[in-house]
Image (tube, helix red, strand yellow):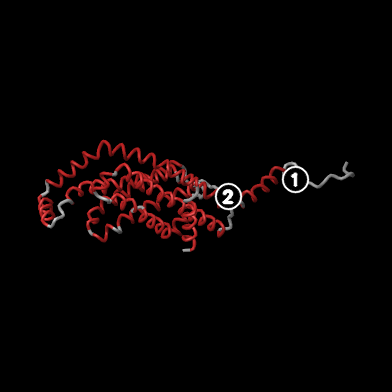
Amino acid sequence: MNLILDSFWRAVAYCLHPRVIALSFLPLVIMVALSLGLGYFYWEPALDWVRAMLESSAWITRLWGWLEGVGVGNLKTVLAPLIVIFAVTPVIVLLSLLIVAVLMTPALVALVAERRFPKLERKKGGSLVISIFWSLGSTLLAVIALVVSLPLWLIPPLILVLPPLIWGWLTYRVMAFDVLAEHASKAERVELFRRHRGQLLGIGILTGYLGAAPSIVWASGALFAAAFVVLAPVAIWIYTLVFAFSSLWFAHFGLAALEKLRAESGTSATSVPEILEPLALRDDLSPQQPATTPPATPFAS
């Protein structure tokens, strides 16, 4: 628990670092351009399709009549935009997570390693290709979980539990792998995942709940439709900052846990060079000064 709290406040402090703030704008620019482009071409067709689907349902038509009878018929104009918003939110979350993982996480891990763990040996247990496949595989599993659990979201308590659990699991899988890819060996990464799976998943779930904040921004109904250009970048930037904070939290936790693991096993960050260098020197000198050859004497014939 001390390691979680220590890494938490360090991640909060690092979010105020100028380099972190500057890095957060690159995913923002990409996501805003993508969202505005897709919104420009597909927002109105998506609304028309949802409205047509709602009007073709008999029980929804009866619901509209009942709502108009109690004086809240204006909800009819709000429901279609909300459905589209809630439908595209998971896609934006996934894309934001992947973009941050690819563009920001390596730089943030390097920042943490440079400032806190400059002597931690880099064993490069995961390459960029492995990281990409790991992220894509984890994302695919998360999407399947979202689709399978979607009917359960209609149950009020579960909609507050299932999405953060899925986001948390995905965040834990992607971020924990990426922060350890450069410094930990494969065996060390597997051991850290085994030891700290519950804590890593807890960090992922907490950041998953933080990722629900932009949904509150977007759930402003008709206001969203009128202020799409303003609210969309704000929501996406919140996503970016949340995932940047998540990367920093995982980086501080993962590298500190790796340092502790190596200390327990007696393998410090500098022990390998210190041992190998004298051995190499002795190997180089051994042909010239063999230990079994007696020194030359003046009386030798």
> Does residue 168 appear in this view?
no
CA neighbours of label 1 inside 10 A, class few (<14), some (14 to 19), many (20+): few
At which x and y percent is residue 157?
A: 26, 61
What's the residue at 76%, 44% (across, down)?
Answer: 289
Instruction: Name the residue tied to disc 1.
Output: 290
- Please give the name of the residue rendered at 36% of the width and 41% of the height, measured from the top-left corner: 31
Left or right: residue 298 versus residue 159 is right
Quarter of the image where one finds residue 203 = bottom left
- Residue that badge 2 annotates: 118
Q: Secondary structure at mark 1?
A: loop
Given residues 30 and 290, the one toward you in this image is 30
Task: Locate residue 244, reporting x and y percent.
Answer: 43, 49
Graded by Cα atoms within 10 Å as few (under 14), some (14 to 19) or many (20 or more), the crowding at tag 2 reads few
Task: Quarter of the image for the C terminus: give it.
Answer: top right
Q: Is residue 8 above or below residue 283?
A: below
Question: Position of 166 compared to 104: left or right?
Answer: left
Instruction: Tell me, yes or no, if residue 28 can be seen here.
Output: yes
Residue 278, percent from left and from top: 68, 48
Query: How many numbered discs?
Result: 2
Tell me: 76 left or right of 253.
left
Query: Reading the chain from its start, which is encountered first: label 2 or label 1?
Result: 2
Q: Extreme right residue here?
A: 299
User: Residue at left 46%, top 43%?
Assistant: 23
Task: Name the amino acid, label 1.
Answer: Pro
Q: Three-letter amino acid code at disc 2?
A: Pro
Q: Nearer the viewer, residue 281 or 221?
A: 221
The extreme bottom residue here reads 1
Q: Of 166 and 222, which appears nearest the observer?
A: 222
Q: Position of residue 291 (x, y in %)?
A: 75, 48
Q: Is residue 190 depicted above or below 287 in this figure?
A: below
